[in-house]
Image (cartoon, rainbow, N blue to C red):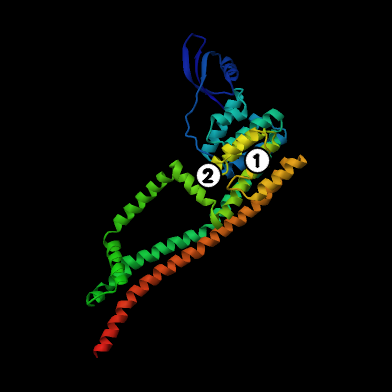
Amino acid sequence: MPEYRYQAQDSKGKIVKGKADAFDETDLQKRFHESGLLLLEAKPIQKQMSLKPLKKTKLADFCRQLGTLIKSGVILVKAIEIIANDESISDYERQLYLRLRDRIVQGVALSYVMEELEPAFPPLLIFMIRAAETSGTLDTTCLRLAEQYTSEAQLEQTAKNSLTYPKILGVLIVLVVAILFGYVLPQFDEIFATLPKLPLPTRILMAISDFVANKWYIILIVVVLAIIFGKMIVKIPAIRLTIDHIKVMGKWGKLTKVIYSARFARTMSSLYSSGIPIHSCIEIAKSTIGNKYIEDQFVEVERKVSGGMPLSAALMDVNGFVSKLSATIKVGEETGMLGNMLESVADDLDFYSKQALLKLTSYIEPVMIVVMAVAVGFIMISIIQPIYQSYQTIGAGS
């Protein structure tokens, strides 16, 4: 419910100022009239809030509840109010949904309110809601969006779950190496000090051990600075473009292409099925791919489509998509069932993208194990080698 800052006058002519909640100015005036007050002025209070993007799971829940309530005959304002009063949502979500309701009460369309609240709501959601408001299919559009965001959230969760073991293994590698360098190796200082000459690997190892044991804080500072500057460097357009290009190269690229194709197909399917023009579909869908290198190639795709070329032909030259995507779209264009074919290929590629994520992580695990084995093996050889040589010297002397 909107909050108003008001000025009113009582029966004795005294001016009263304050704040009050009301559905609109008319409702506020009615309340004051019933209380014997004359409303002189009322201004809505716009509360400042820090906007941040909603997670896909939250977007899926919002769209699902909104679509279900509207389909059941609940009016839009009441539906959003019910969602806002849900005890399971966060305070940020509640404030966001109440802001939606308050602006809709003032006569603003839902899609335009969402646009005002960017980046809380993504462009895909805004455009589809706007198209649904025009066609009168808000309930079905919301339910379709709920399915899409649920699918994307599941894919992201699959990626996170797949990376759990590599993350644990990475932490173990760091801990094992830190313990060896910081605690175990210094125990051999006295033994190695009695030896006339140490092998090169042992000297390198002991130098690293001394540095870790005595100057560990320098390593910590370097790591923190590397993370900070690494994040800054990645944001440089040229660097980001190069990294995204590498992502679609080689065997690794074969897997990531499936993921990017699935994202594009799913978004295109949802937009096109909602009646949004093909040019707008392409413009929105390209921003959901998540790869700057592929996105930059859409300047040429949009130019070709504007010139009358079919979408399937324009996508064939895009380096970053699987050939199956353009082939399926071509069938949809020829049969006049582009929406259905986009949905079909999106479902198909979603399945393969999950498999691709599992393959990606399956490559990471053995590499990390080999790295750990090489590190521990180097340490063991560097320790055993001088001891073994000293035994040989003693044996030769005797």
Kind of residue indicated by mark 2: Tyr
Question: Residue drawn 24% across and 88% down?
Answer: 397
Numbered disc 2: secondary structure = helix
Question: Residue drawn 47% across and 17% down?
Answer: 17
Could you tell me residue 183's position as x and y percent?
31, 67
Question: Residue drawn 61% across and 53% down?
Answer: 353
When the figure is inspected, residue 106 is found, relative to residue 289, above or below; the finding is above
**Residue receiving disc 1:** 268
Residue 169 appears left or right of 332: left
Residue 277 in view here: yes
Task: Say few, some or many: other residues with alpha carbon within 10 Å of mark 1 (under 14 / 14 to 19 / 20 or more).
Answer: many
Q: Which mark is residue 293?
A: 2
Could you tell me residue 393's position as x and y percent?
26, 84
- Of the 4 image quadrants, the one containing the N terminus is top right
Which residue ends up furthest to the right in the rendered image? 335
Sequence-wise, the earlier of marks 2 and 1 is 1
Q: On the image, which quarter does residue 131 sit in?
A: top right
